[in-house]
Image: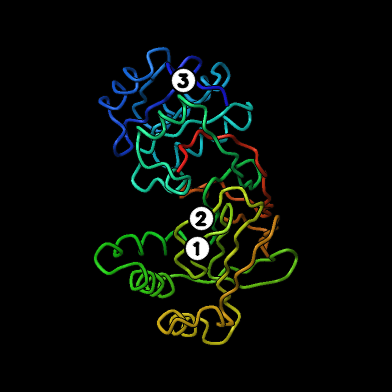
Amino acid sequence: LPARPTGEGVTVVVNLTSRGADEALAERLRGALPDAQVLTAADGAEAAAALAEAAGQAAVLGVAGGDGTVNTAARLAADHGIPLLVFPAGTFNHFARDLGIEGVDGVLDALRTGQAVEVDAGLVGEDVFMNTFSVGAYVDLVHGREEHEARLGKWPATVLGALGVLRRGSALTVRVDGRPRRIWLLFAGNCRYEPAGLGPSYRPRLADGDLDVRIVDGDHPFARLRLIAALTTGTLATCPVYQYLSVSALTLESADGSALSYSVDGEACAGSPRLSLRKLTGRLLVYRPTG
C-alpha cells in the first residue's frame, strides 16, 4: 500500500468508551499524523456514525476501539474498497492481536512504510464478522471462561464455563445444512482457530478461506455428562457430542420457523429463521507491521 507518513488521506475514529481509547490517545495520533483527521466519539453509536461518514471520504479508515467498533470499521472499509488501520484499544482486541498488532507504534510504522496484509471476513446475512459468529450458549461460555481465566488458567476456566452454561441452558432444534439437529451451541470462526477444543484463542492466519465450525450436539444420550467428561479428561477430539469442521459456507435454519438469535464478534444481532454463512476471501487490506 502507499506509505502515508504524515497521515494524508487518513481518518481515525477513537471510541472513547473503549478501554485504552481516550483523549490522550487521540492527541498522540494527531501529533504523530499531522495530516490525518482524528475524531473522537462518545459511544459506540456515535463511533459508528462517524465511521460511516468517514468511509465515503477517506483514503484510509482508521479506528481505535474494541472488537465491536473494529467490526463496524472493517465492514465499512470492505464495502468502500479502502484499507483499514486498527489501533488496539478495547478489552480483548481479538482481531488486532491475531494480526500481530500489539501497540500504537507498530501500527504507525506500518502506515508510514505501507506494510499491509489481506484478510478474510465472514458474512451472515448482511452482518460481517471479523472474529466469530455464534448461536446458542457459546457467548455465555466465553464470558464464563474469561471471568475465571486469569485466576485458574484457560483449560480449568473453560471447563468451569461449560459447566455453568450446560447447567442453565437448553438445546436448540435446528437444521444445519439441511440436516435436523439438536445443538447446545454452534460457533463459526473467521479462519481456523487454535486450539481445536471449546477454548479457541488465536488464529495462525487471517486469510485461509475457511469457517472454523464447532458444534456441541444435544441429541446424544447424556450429552452434558459426556461433554464435561471429555473436557476434564482431554478427550474432546473423540467425543461424539463435539463436532469440529472447516467449511467455506454453512446454512442454519430454525426447525419451527422462529427467529434464531445470534451474535457476531460478541455483539447481539437481530434474529432470523434462516442464517446463511459464507466467507469473503481476501476482501480487506489492513495495515500491519512486519515481524
Q: Earlier in the sequence, mark 1 or mark 2?
A: 1
Determine the residue positioned at 65% across, 55% down: 210
Determine the residue positioned at 56% across, 56% down: 189
Given the current orientation, which residue lies at the most extreme bottom position?
221
User: Which residue lies under the disc numbered 2?
Assistant: 203
Indicate which label's residue lies in the foreground, 3 or 2.
2
Mark 2, other Cα within 10 Å: few <14 / some 14–19 / many ≥20: many
Residue 167, position as x, y percentages in the image: 40, 75
User: Which residue lies under the disc numbered 1?
Assistant: 194
243 sits left or right of 176 in the view: left
Given the current orientation, which residue lies at the most extreme top position?
35
Disc on res. 173: none
C-beta proximity under 8 Å, tags 3 and 2: no
Name the amino acid, label 2: Arg
Indicate which label's residue lies in the foreground, 3 or 1.
1
As helix, strand or loop, the secondary structure at mark 2 comes to: loop
Closer to the camera in the image, 171 or 47: 47
Determine the CA span between mark 1 and mark 2.
6 Å
Residue 279, position as x, y percentages in the image: 67, 48
Residue 111, position as x, y percentages in the image: 47, 27
As helix, strand or loop, the secondary structure at mark 1 comes to: loop
